[in-house]
Amino acid sequence: MYIVQIASECAPVIKAGGLGDVVYGLSRELENQGHSVELILPKYDCMRYDHIWGLHDAFTNLWVPWYGGAIHCSVYCGWVHGRLCFFIEPHSGDNFFNRGCYYGSNDDNMRFALFSKAALEFLLQSNKRPDVIHCHDWQTGLVPVMLYEMYKYYGMEYQRVCYTIHNFKHQGSAGVETLWATGLNQESYYFQSDKLQDNFNPFALNFMKGGIVYSNAVTTVSPHHAWEARYTDIGYGLGHTLHLHQDRFTGVLNGIDHDFWNPETDRYIPSHYTKDNFEEKAKNKKALRERLLLQDVEKPIISYIGRLDEQKGVHLVHHAMYYALHNGAQFVLLGSATESSINNHFRHEKDFLNNNPDVHLELGFNEELSHLIYAGADMIIVPSNYEPCGLTQMIGLKYGTVPIVRGVGGLVNTVFDKDYDQTKPPEERNGYVFYQSDYHALEFSLERPLKLWYNNPEEFRKLALAGMEYDYSWNHPGEEYVKIYDRIRHKW
């Protein structure tokens, strides 16, 4: 099968969040399963060019219709760690992708509308006819709209679209100018509730809604998050639209890269280990303490790795730190804040706790250190307010680091409570889950593993090993997407 991914990110060359990891990981897995995969990406001025091999001109004379004229674009081709990528560069005074950033401009909607239009023009003019076009998030929500309202009449009537939503919070909003710029034009047609009209603002178009309405298959990044998007406020107003198109909406759990996240081969940790020599993990714990100047005592280490913001339950992260220190544990945090107030708060805590030998706060992101924390910690806390999929808990399980998670999104699909889960036999349970977002619920779910660690270390070890048994690689998601692709190839 021939698959083209159209996205605004692909790790490691373009990465602002988990989207980039998914686009790269899924593409590689599809290729490993024998399919032909190409990626179309914007050519940002600030992307990591050192991760592109053999960058060269691929299509130098791409004219993209825009308003009443056309914008000249160049398309470059290169390999990103084995993936064949095409990068689109518009030549325009608007400097669409020469901003020194990926997102955050006031005209992001027009930037990515142009990118979506240019990606389709590139497929059309280069005579590429993939079996499936796989689009991601609001930035490419207009691709299926333009494909089925315009480009199918130019010779692309057999292409099918799978559309994956990674974050419902950001949906892409625009006015009538987007219709005139892209050539869709017909205001009264697209400003209808069953087309692109925003569900709450009748004067706005919603890119993500367009992607849902016009795609042959719509997915999000975990089965439970798909339920949340339909039935709770996590759908940010798109629940009704998802209900209308429920026959083609599903959740497919993301995967993690087992070549990169693997304690058996990890180049960032001093001692490799597997389920069969799990005792070697203790050497990484010792190395972590030495690096972070923690005292080497008989205590468990609880860790947190991730952003410090409201989505991640930052108030619970803070509470978990002090609960750990007051209940016989050490605490290690690696994370960067997205708001200055949160950053200032944790900087104050870092200064206040500077001489405490049982805690270390690393404010920022350090790839090498994150691997050592996964390998050296005993537990990892993931108290998110919402979490579409979550990779932290999957990585923790792979490293035998017991996850303590809030029961939302993909966390529900990957972590099964040792004491209370009814879907798994006791020997297959792998962590701890709490559902409320208050301190009492968090404390109860921290108290249980701490007691187990102190009172029954062999049972704690079995719990860690049970987590290592789970396969959350890209193998299974890749197979699920191939089934989706096969289904939509033979059905509108």
Image (cartoon, rainbow, N blue to C red):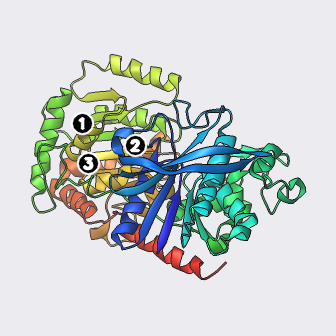
User: In the image, what residue occupies the spot 54% across and 63% down?
Assistant: 134
Q: CA distance from mark 1 to mark 3?
A: 10 Å
Q: What's the residue type where badge 3 is placed?
A: Lys
Query: Residue most toward the right?
Result: 188
Describe residue 11's horizontal placement relative to residue 190 as left or right. Answer: left
Q: Which disc number belongs to residue 451?
A: 3
Looking at the rendered structure, the number of numbered marks drawn on it comes to 3
* Residue at (79% x, 50% y) in the render: 179
* Tag 1–tag 3 contact (CB < 8 Å): no
- Tell me if 268 is positioned left or right of 216 in this view: left
**Left or right: 296, with 177 as reference point:** left
Q: Residue 330's quadrant in the figure?
A: top left
The span from disc 2 to disc 3 (Cα, nearest Å) is: 12 Å
**What element does badge 1 sit on?**
loop
Q: Secondary structure at mark 2?
A: helix
Query: What's under tag 2, amino acid-wise?
Result: Glu
Q: Residue 409, image x and y in percent? A: 51, 56
Out of 104 and 419, give the one closest to the viewer. 104
Characterize the local packing of mark 3: few (<14), some (14-19) or many (20 or more) Cα atoms within 10 angstroms: some
Q: Quick one: quadrant of the C terminus?
A: bottom right
According to the picture, the residue beneath numbered tag 1 turns out to be 328
Residue occupied by mark 2 = 443
Mark 2, Cα crowd under 10 Å, few <14 / some 14-19 / many 20+, is some
Q: Name the residue: 48% across, 57% down.
A: 39
Relative to 221, residue 175 above or below = above
Q: Residue at x 82, y 46 (%)?
A: 176
Name which of mark 2 and mark 1 comes first in the sequence.
1
